Image (cartoon, grey):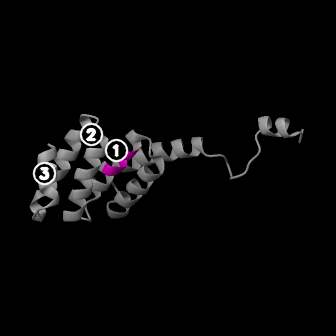
Amino acid sequence: MKSIQGDLRNVILPSKWEALLNNLGHTCRKMKKYDEALEYHQQALVLDPLNPSTYSSIGFIHALMGNIQEAVDAFHRALGLRRDDTFTATMLGYVMQQLIDEAPPYPGIYTIESMLQTGYC
């Protein structure tokens, strides 16, 4: 696959190859080759920058990789292009919940443990 990928970088492809690049990205994702999958989807975006499915695919890969903020951004872009996409809306809900669970309510918040350690309690 690397020889194909290397060749694709040096060739200008017609837009009809966008589906093939996305399918290669899906295949790589299923094989857990996330970086390679992202590259194929990025190449597909060059050919068709307004395809919401490609943005959803990129968001899904970022979510699998643990890149939550990037996943949120990609899902928002996809929903900006197609608002009624059930998969994207559901995945956005999941990653937003992960983002909320990871972040404190506001920056600089004191936890009980940190207050005890610093003598504020």
62 on left or right of 69: left
Residue 38: give x, y in percent of width and height. 29, 49
For the residues marked 1 and 2, what is the alpha-carbon distance in whole angstroms? 7 Å
- Report the quarter where the C terminus lies: top right
- Residue 48 in view, yes or no: no
Marks 1 and 2: CB-CB under 8 Å? yes
User: Which mark is first along the chain, 1 or 3?
Assistant: 3
Q: Which residues are magenta?
A: 58-62
Q: Amino acid at mark 2?
A: Arg
The residue tagged 3 is 20
Mark 1 vs 2, N-terminal side: 2
Residue neighbourhood size for the residue with mark 3, other residues' Cα within 10 Å, grouped as few (<14), some (14–19), many (≥20): few
Task: Using the rendered view, name the quadrant where residue 53 is placed.
Answer: bottom left
CA separation in Å, label 3 and label 1: 17 Å
Indicate which disc, 2 or 3, sits on the residue closer to the N terminus: 3
Which disc is residue 61 wearing? 1
What is the count of numbered marks?
3
Q: Position of residue 14 (x, y in %)?
A: 9, 65
Q: Are marks 2 and 3 in contact (CB under 8 Å)?
A: no
The residue under label 1 is which amino acid type?
Answer: Ile
Viewer-side residue, 18 vs 38: 38
- SS type, badge 1: helix
Residue drawn at x 76%, y 40% is 111
Secondary structure beneath dot 2 equals: helix
Q: Is residue 106 above or below residue 65?
A: below
Q: Position of residue 113 (x, y in %)?
A: 78, 34
Q: Is residue 26 visible?
A: yes
What residue did someone put label 2 on? Answer: 29
Q: Residue at x 74, y 48 (%)?
A: 109
